[in-house]
Image (cartoon, rainbow, N blue to C red):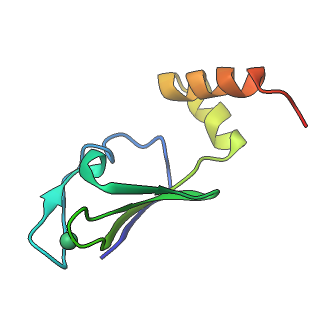
Amino acid sequence: MTITVHDYYQAGWRETLHPCPACEWKGDSRQMEMELHDEQTEYSCPQCEFPLLVVQHPTLDQVKAAADAGNEEAQQQLAILAMAPRG
Ligand SMILES: [Zn+2]
């Protein structure tokens, strides 16, 4: 089963251990194969490439809300966004 993380800022998804349903592998997101897309990041089993985790990227509103709530990562992302040139 592929797990979808709808809230990027929810704690713990990076550290959660996911057993692969297709093989014997088990590990967290840092050990998985990562594939970046515009809207989401997909993590798959490093052994058999079964998709284990889909993390939807936060919208700007979500980044702002998380930063307001004291999330350090969101605050850093907001600072980076503020520095980016606008097209
Ligand atoms: Zn696997």
Give the quarter the ligand 1 occupies. Answer: bottom left
| x then y, percent, for residue 86 | 88, 32
Say how many tags the image has.
0
Classify residue 15 as left or right of residue 11: left
Q: Residue at x 35, y 72 (%)?
A: 2
| x then y, percent, for residue 80 | 67, 24
Q: Quadrant of residue 51?
A: bottom left
**15 is higher (above) or lower (below) than 2:** above
Q: Residue at x 62, y 58 (%)?
A: 39
| x then y, percent, for residue 61 | 70, 41
Q: Is residue 68 visible?
A: yes
**47 is higher (above) or lower (below) than 13:** below
Classify residue 21 as left or right of residue 66: left
Classify residue 24 as left or right of residue 36: left
Classify residue 45 as left or right of residue 59: left
**46 is higher (above) or lower (below) than 78:** below
Q: Residue at x 29, y 55 (%)?
A: 32
Residue nearest the viewer, comparing 83 with 17: 83
| x then y, percent, for residue 59 | 67, 47
Q: Residue at x 91, y 37 (%)?
A: 87
Q: Residue furthest front?
A: 47
Q: Residue furthest right?
A: 87
Residue nearest the viewer, comparing 46 with 52: 46
Image quarter of the N terminus: bottom left
